[in-house]
């Protein structure tokens, strides 16, 4: 099932023609399908009925998206105090919130402890002591899971691999015994589980299996050392088919969990982000100019790397489609799709095989619902990209475009300048 299909020759989000949104809101604009968001999270819940689903807010933090997913029963995996505030404001109960990340500040920990979240994932002995100090100051006991580093390679981009020895994430096996001994001396910390996450954009079920088997051995080892473990946070990282070449096998993942971690009888959590939101969103853009070079034809669009940074940051692929369906016999030629920013890295595709495109045409970058708007910026004082949510025939702006005048108003010039 896809939420973005051609209907009578025009690309639509659910039942809403994208030109209607472009005419009302302008471009570039992120467009999300509520139908697809619900379907994605419900697919996971149906395949894994005994596993808590905590959506990774870093993938898409829009309040409308979080509210919708929360009403579907999802919790939240957060990595900052700001994400905690967003999750709570969206109505997600604190008891369904997990706090991950290597650099939590005292203020962030205080906010999480005051809210009474489900657990804090500690990444080091030093952080465990920090959590104990903040919990003591507030007169509470913090529920903590130790994030372990299983030293398992993930078949993914090196910038989003997180489970190998030497990565900044997690506690190495050689340190576990000393961390367990420390935990027993901290009266305001209850280590109740382990957490693991080996990377993002994963398809290899065997990599998960290997990481979970290592984690299970750590779990049993730490229980033998006297820690009252009763939870496993299994991370996320489920891949999505940006180029249509692979689909994450949820059924195989579910079976793998039944074969590996479920026999422990502990509470389980997973933290999908990209899998839930990526294919539920597109970036809608307009061609501003066609530049014919000696060796390349450049399609210059009004979206840029500040709106969608993934191609510049990760060399990532996004399928590109014209909003008006091309004729069946339209010639396909190699074209470079680029943005207007004064950076050579502001390039979405090189020598991409595309039908004819002309100035004024609308096009979309597919599978852009994850790590798109949430990583956008106002570089070059460009308007901050707008966001729209569609549900069937209804649609609404869920983040307005932030123009230059508003951005200038954010700055304060001292009297003495």
Image (cartoon, rainbow, N blue to C red):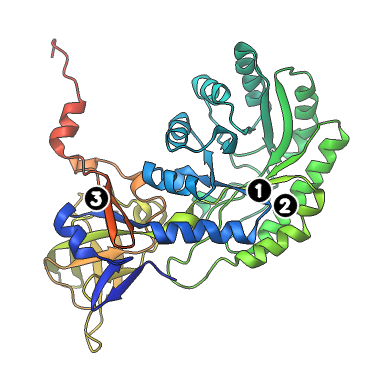
| Of pointers 2 and 3, the one earlier in the residue sequence | 2
Q: CA distance from mark 1 to mark 3?
A: 39 Å
Residue, x 30% and y 56% (percent of image)? 31
Depth check: give the residue in front, 82 or 175. Answer: 82
How many other residues sit within 10 Å of disc 1, few (<14), some (14-19) or many (≥20)?
Answer: many
Image mark for residue 212: 2
Residue, x 81% and y 49% (percent of image)? 264
> Is residue 157 among the parts visible in the rendering?
yes
Query: The N terminus appears in which quarter of the rendering?
Result: bottom left
How many other residues sit within 10 Å of disc 2, few (<14), some (14-19) or many (≥20)?
Answer: many
Q: Position of residue 25 (x, y in %)?
A: 18, 52
- Quadrant hosting residue 36: bottom left
Q: Position of residue 82 (x, y in %)?
A: 43, 31
Residue with the mark numbered 1: 234
Q: Mark 2 or mark 3: which is in front?
A: 2
Q: Tag 2's secondary structure? A: helix
Outermost residue toward the bottom in this view: 329
Residue, x 48% and y 32% (percent of image)? 84
| Labels 2 & 1 near each other (Cβ < 8 A) | yes
Outermost residue toward the right in this view: 224
The image shows residue 198, relative to residue 107, as above or below, that is below
| Of pointers 1 and 3, the one earlier in the residue sequence | 1
| Of pointers 2 and 1, the one earlier in the residue sequence | 2
Residue 197 shown left or right of residue 28 in the figure: right
Residue with the mark numbered 3: 343
Residue, x 30% and y 67% (percent of image)? 15
Residue 175 shown left or right of residue 372 in the figure: right
How many other residues sit within 10 Å of disc 3, few (<14), some (14-19) or many (≥20)?
Answer: few
The image shows residue 72, relative to residue 410, as above or below, that is below
The image shows residue 99, relative to residue 60, as above or below, that is above
Q: CA distance from mark 2 to mark 3?
A: 42 Å
């Amino acid at each position: 099932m896809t939420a973005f299909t051609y209907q009578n020759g025009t690309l639509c989000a659910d039942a809403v023609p994208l030109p209607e949104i472009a005419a009302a809101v302008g471009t570039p604009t992120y467009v999300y399908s509520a139908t697809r968001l619900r379907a994605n999270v419900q697919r996971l819940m149906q395949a894994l009925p005994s596993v808590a689903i905590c959506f990774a807010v870093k993938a898409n933090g829009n309040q409308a998206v979080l509210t919708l997913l929360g009403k579907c029963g999802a919790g939240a995996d957060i990595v900052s105090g700001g994400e905690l505030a967003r999750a709570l404001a969206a109505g997600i109960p604190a008891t369904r919130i997990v706090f991950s990340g290597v650099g939590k500040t005292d203020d962030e920990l205080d906010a999480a402890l005051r809210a009474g979240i489900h657990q804090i994932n500690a990444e080091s002995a030093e952080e465990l002591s920090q959590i104990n100090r903040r919990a003591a100051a507030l007169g509470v006991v913090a529920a903590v899971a130790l994030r372990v580093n299983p030293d398992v390679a993930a078949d993914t981009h090196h910038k989003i691999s997180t489970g190998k020895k030497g990565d900044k994430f997690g506690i190495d096996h050689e340190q576990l015994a000393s961390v367990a001994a420390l935990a027993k001396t901290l009266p305001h910390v209850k280590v109740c589980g382990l957490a693991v996450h080996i990377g993002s954009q994963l398809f290899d079920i065997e990599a998960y299996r290997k990481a979970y088997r290592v984690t299970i051995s750590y779990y049993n080892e730490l229980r033998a050392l006297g820690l009252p473990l009763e939870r496993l946070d299994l991370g996320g990282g489920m891949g999505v088919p940006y180029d249509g070449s692979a689909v994450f096998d949820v059924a195989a993942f579910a079976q793998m969990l039944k074969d590996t971690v479920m026999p422990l009888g502990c509470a389980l959590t997973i933290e999908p982000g990209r899998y839930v939101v990526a294919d539920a969103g597109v970036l809608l853009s307009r061609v501003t100019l066609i530049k014919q070079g000696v060796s390349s034809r450049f399609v210059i669009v009004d979206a840029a790397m500040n709106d969608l940074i993934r191609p510049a940051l990760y060399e990532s692929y996004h399928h590109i489609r014209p909003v008006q369906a091309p004729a069946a016999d339209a010639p396909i030629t190699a074209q470079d799709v680029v943005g207007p920013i004064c950076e050579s890295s502001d390039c979405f595709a090189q020598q991409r095989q595309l039908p004819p495109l002309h100035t004024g045409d609308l096009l979309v970058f597919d599978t852009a619902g994850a790590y798109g708007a949430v990583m956008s910026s106002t570089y070059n004082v460009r308007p901050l990209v707008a966001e729209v949510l569609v549900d069937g025939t209804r649609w609404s702006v869920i983040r307005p475009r932030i123009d230059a005048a508003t951005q200038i108003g954010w700055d304060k010039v001292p009297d003495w300048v």
